[in-house]
Amino acid sequence: MMNIVSRKGCAVGVGLLALLACATAGEGSKAHAKSAAAAPQSASARPGETPESIIKNWAPRSRTTARLMLEKYGKPAQFDRNTLVWFNNGEWKKTIVHRKIYRHDPAGKRQDFLEQTVGYLVPADKLADLKRFNPMVEASLTAGELTFASDSESKNRLALNLAEEIVTGKRGVADARAFFLKTTRLAASGKSSSYLDKLQFEADNSLYMTPTGADQ
């Protein structure tokens, strides 16, 4: 009699374990499905996609900027669904057109889709001055690069020209900031400036980063 009860108890125990295992598996499957759904989709270009076909899904402002760069510099060296990238194009060491604004802007006033870089070594003691001039100026001491992002190539030139003048002591931060604002306003009304048309300094786009992090 005791043996019979023992077998029944074992059967019940095994049944409960099976139910628990199924429940756990079900929870795991749901969690996995939820995790998979929440995972971001790859930005990689799909087979057959081209820069021209990709930017058709971009917002009007970034799409217009991308088309201008494609017309001027041809096919990018790299691209995915969020960026087009050129290297050593014209006066630039690197040009990147972003699908979305380069940095988050809570006020929604900036349209920083176009990021452009030149080879230029900025002394460490000038970094703070450059940030005071414009937070969008980025200097890499290890890569030997100076970068700015805005909504146009001419504005990028203007900012980098003024950044170079700050570094070399030709212009103070306040003066550079005032000149930048004045020149961008005049440009909006159709007036030009040599600061907008080309870089006013010699960039060294051959600078590259070595494995040790030293600039060459």
Image (cartoon, rainbow, N blue to C red):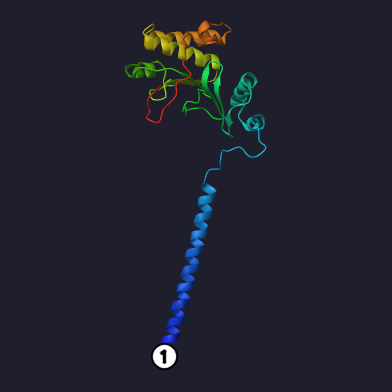
Identified at 38% across, 19% down, the residue is: 131
Residue 133: x, y in percent?
40, 15
Question: Does 18 sit above or below residue 31?
Answer: below
Question: Does 81 sit above or below residue 131?
Answer: below
Identified at 33% across, 19% down, the residue is: 124
Residue 35: x, y in percent?
50, 51
Identified at 38% across, 9% down, the residue is: 168
| Count of numbered tags | 1
Question: Does 93 sit above or below residue 199?
Answer: below
| Quarter holding residue 55 | top right
Nearer to me, 169 or 78:
78
Identified by mark 1, the residue type is Asn
Drawn side of residue 3 relative to residue 184, left or right: left
The quadrant the N terminus occupies is bottom left
Query: Please, which residue is most extreme toward the bottom here?
Result: 1
Nearer to me, 205 or 154:
205
Drawn side of residue 166 relative to residue 197, left or right: left
Residue 132: x, y in percent?
37, 17
Identified at 36% across, 19% down, the residue is: 127
Nearer to me, 189 or 214:
214
Nearer to me, 123 or 28:
123
| Quarter holding residue 65 | top right
The quadrant the C terminus occupies is top left
Mark 1: few/some/many CA within 10 Å (<14, 14-19, 20+): few
Drawn side of residue 178 relative to residue 101, left or right: left
Q: Secondary structure at mark 1?
A: helix
Residue placed under numbered mark 1 in the picture:
3
Residue 143: x, y in percent?
42, 24
